[in-house]
Amino acid sequence: MDARTRAEELDKASNLIFDTLIIGGGITGAGILLDASSRGLKSILLEMQDFAEGTSSRSTKLVHGGLRYLKQLQLGVVRKTGKERAILNKNAPYLIKKVDMMLPIYKGGSLKKIPTKIALYVYDRLAGVAKQEKYRFITKDEALEKQPCLPSKDLSGCFLYTEYQTDDARLVIEILKTSRTYGANAFNYCEVTSISKENGLFIVKCYDHINNKEYLIKSKSLVNATGPWTDKTMKLNLNDGTSRVVHSKGVHIVVDKNLLPLSTPVYFENTDSRMIFAIPRLDKVYIGTTDTLYNQDPKTPKIQDSDIDYLVNAINSFFRNHPITRNDILSSWAGVRPLIKGRSNNTQELSRKDEIFISTNGMITIAGGKLTGYRLMAKSVVDLLMKGFPGLNAICVSESIQLIGTNDSFNTTQEDWYFKYGASAASIQSEFQGSDIEKELRYCIRNEMCTNLSDFFVRRSGMSYFQPERIEESLKYCIKIFKEELGWDETLTQTELIRLRKDITV
Ligand SMILES: Cc1cc2nc3c(=O)[nH]c(=O)nc-3n(C[C@H](O)[C@H](O)[C@H](O)COP(=O)(O)OP(=O)(O)OC[C@H]3O[C@@H](n4cnc5c(N)ncnc54)[C@H](O)[C@@H]3O)c2cc1C
């Protein structure tokens, strides 16, 4: 995935006939690309923005074990999600950080000790949670020692259970790079603008926003994995106007850890009984999320004053911290959940399940779901695709595919790079010259199709969220690298600086 040869690769792709073409480069599309290519399908993925720029870089960044499904008694889903979490941990350990999630119990709160204990007990068994990761209960004193800013009044104690923290955008990129090892192609900034079918072949028109060029890509099968854009993409195909998804917006804010000194994440009940996460990462803490119906453009979900007030008030009315204000917010993000339409208009009540729809011309659409279930979602889609390729081995092998950065014996002192790039951290260190930021960016341009400053600061390095203070000092080095690697001139540099400023505005 080399940004320097992206245009040539696209030219080449337009002369080929693919077995499958996937629209959408979020976690769902990336998972399908890996599964399809590893089963021998000649596969291509087209993403209209940067990879993961849709919902898949805007989540709470947790690989959940499916605890929330227990409440809805979806026991089969809890079992499957727990298993998926363990598979991801085995296949991409570098992308997972295990953390103790604290679930405090208060007298008079709606979370009661005995029902929560039963739920966690059942969950541990159903989800096949490893012995050392099973839940435990700590006393009030132990809880306050561990987390002094918890309110002590009416605190009965605290449950601790293991959550897996990840970096959603990095997970997408690492899956795409792994797909590349199976010969798959993936292009960012390529927007699918029309779909037709002639003589059994899908003809997909796409617009390359980087070189302002239109391409026609041919494929024997077609998958719509466009998340919040599911309905829009279905409309491109056969002018199908049926509406399948509803959008729910979720917002996160980031503050300095000095203001909310948490030693480990806390999942607490807000005054309106909604559960909120407060999760430390590096020297920051992120807090989220909201869940509100959203009817505007999913491309640039806006954070409203009311979203910020909600989260700031949640923190200030729960923790014994020095009150935070909006001025303390260092960064933030909003994401749009693509939820399968149901009977309720209340997005919190809508199921997070995924669903497949097959159009009359054979396009397969998959929507809904969670980051955590991406591998199983991909398996369902590719199982269907394989029916069109009877000569190929149809067995799914993704359960045993280790992502490209996995290397059991790898050891590094660059902990931050290891969490992002796994074993590739060593080559970043040894292959390139210059400062750390120059090395990291050069690697991302040459291996991760990083084409501009936002790609790098927001989705490759995650710096805009958790180290925004590093951006200004890094800019001149990064611009120099883009000039050397991609031949940026002054006009393009200014355009990209404007894009970055817009993307990182709180
Ligand atoms: C606030 C929030 C918190 C969440 N937290 C968690 C969590 O902690 N754990 C978890 O497991 N899940 C979580 N989720 C759910 C998870 O993030 C989503 O289910 C998942 O990211 C959806 O991925 P996707 O690939 O289906 O959609 P997307 O990531 O949106 O990908 C779809 C892609 O399609 C592209 N596209 C659209 N139209 C076109 C076109 N015409 N041509 C080319 N490309 C196109 C878009 O640009 C987009 O990148 C959360 C979601 C939200 C909103």
Image (cartoon, rainbow, N blue to C red):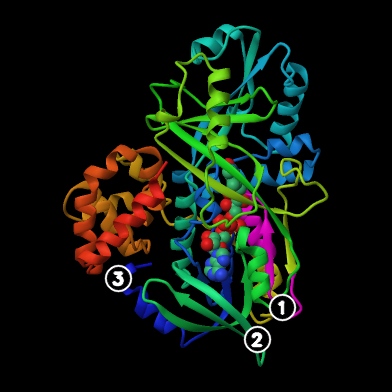
Q: Is residue 330 visible?
A: yes
Q: Which residue is mark 1?
A: 362
3D distance between C-alphas at marks 1 and 2: 10 Å
Q: Which residue is mark 3?
A: 4
- The residue range painted magenta reads 358-380
Which amino acid type is marked by label 2? Lys
Q: Are marks 1 and 3 in contact (CB under 8 Å)?
A: no
| 478, above or below 388, in the image | above
Q: Which residue is mark 2?
A: 197
**Looking at mark 1, is its residue's CB closer than 8 Å to ligand 1?**
no
The label shown at residue 12 is none
| 228, above or below 85, in the image | below
Answer with mark 1 or mark 3, whichever residue precedes in sequence: 3
The reply to whether the magenta stretch includes residue 362 is yes
Quarter of the image with the N terminus is bottom left
Closest to the observer: 299 or 80?
A: 299
Relative image position of residue 307 (x, y in whole percent) = 56, 36
**In the picture provided, is 491 more to the left or to the right than 501?**
left
The residue located at (71%, 27%) in the rendering is 120
| 90, above or below 36, in the image | above
* Numbered disc 2: secondary structure: strand
| 203, above or below 104, in the image | below
